[in-house]
Each structure stands twice: as structure tokens, then as C-alpha cells.
Image: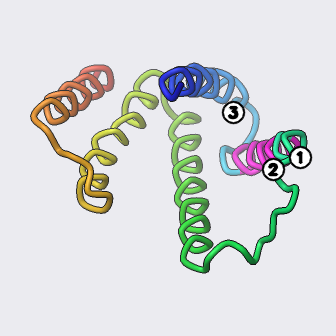
Amino acid sequence: MWLFYAFLSAIFAAAVAIVGKLGLKNIDSTLATTIRSIVMAVFLIAVSLSMRKFDGFNFNSIPAKDWWLIIFAGIFGALSWLFYFFALKHGQAVPVVAIDRLSIVFVLVLAALFLGEAFTLKSLAGTILIAAGAILISIK
């Protein structure tokens, strides 16, 4: 099931790049990202409510460490989107998205360091191919 969700994520990420680029013509990228984030928050709250995710939920049940991890993930996500849409406003969609997807390379290294995930020959080869592809797509 995770693979299905991952493909859906990729499809919607592609839609974000195209619709986002089109929507940045007449608006500052930071303001557009802020508006987009508000829309996302409202949408996700509605989804959580409709799925009854808040039933019996107590904010105090989340350990302080987890709160900090969630907060930092939110800050890192916001920074990622700020820089992504700034780049998208000033650059072409395909090279911007290609460079953005280099996050896979960083995730591989960080997951090995912080999560203890395997860094295999296969993952190294895939990472090299992804990096090479991003560079090839991005150079003029």
C-alpha cells in the first residue's frame, strides 16, 4: 500500500510544480507559499475531522520530544517550500524540480546516520543515478 501512496504523492507533487509555477506569475513567492500553507492547513484539518482523528485525542498525550520533532519538521518543511517556490518563480519548472528531488540523496545519507537505515551498494548506485539525472536536466 505504501507504494500506491508514494506514487500518488509523486503525481500531486508534479501538479504542485505546474500549478504553483503558473500561480507565481503575479504574486510574491513567499506570500504565495504562506497562502498555500493556510489552504493546506485548513484542508488537512477538514480531512482529520472527517476521519475522526481528533476523537479522544489529547495534545498532552504527545511527549515533549515528539512535539519538538513535529515542530522542527514543520519549520524544515516551511523552509523547503519557501526556497522551492522562490526557485520556481525565478527558474524553469523542470530543472527546479530536478534539483529539489536531490533531497533523495540527502535523505539516504541522513537516514543512514540518524535512523540506522542501510546504505547499500544498490542505494548508492541509485543515488548516483538520481544525482547525475538532476544535474543533466538542470544544466543548459
Q: Main secondary structure of the magenta part?
A: helix
Which label lies toward us, 3 or 1? 1
Which of these two is toward me, 14 or 45? 45
Q: Which residue range is magenta in the image?
A: 31-46
- Callout 2 touching callout 1 (CB < 8 Å): yes
Distance from disc 3 to disc 2, alpha carbons, whole Å, reads 34 Å
Residue 139 point in image, percent of width and height:
27, 24
Mark before the other along the chain sequence, 3 or 1: 3
- Of 101 and 45, which appears nearest the observer? 45
Kind of element beneath mark 2: loop
For the residue pair 132 and 119, the one nearer the viewer reads as 119
Asked whether residue 45 is drawn in magenta, I would say: yes
User: Which quadrant, please, contains the C terminus?
Assistant: top left
Q: Against 86, is 112 above or below?
A: below
Q: Secondary structure at mark 3?
A: loop
The residue depicted at 61 percent of the width and 68 percent of the height is 71
**Residue with the mark numbered 1:** 49
Along the horizontal axis of the image, is 119 left or right of 5?
left
What residue do we see at 61% from left, 60% from top? 74
Visual colour scheme: rainbow
Packing grade of label 2 (10 A; few <14, some 14-19, many >=20) is few
Q: Is residue 65 above or below residue 29?
A: below
How far is disc 2 from disc 1 in space, using C-alphas?
6 Å
Residue type at mark 1 is: Leu
Kindly report which numbered mark, 3 or 2, lies closer to the viewer in this rendering: 2
Give the left or right position of residue 52, taking residue 19 as reference: right
Q: Amino acid at mark 3?
A: Leu
Q: Can you give x and y, in whole percent of width and height, for residue 96 in the image? A: 44, 31
Mark seen at residue 53: 2
* Residue at point 26%, 57% (across, down): 116
Quickly name the residue at label 3.
Answer: 24
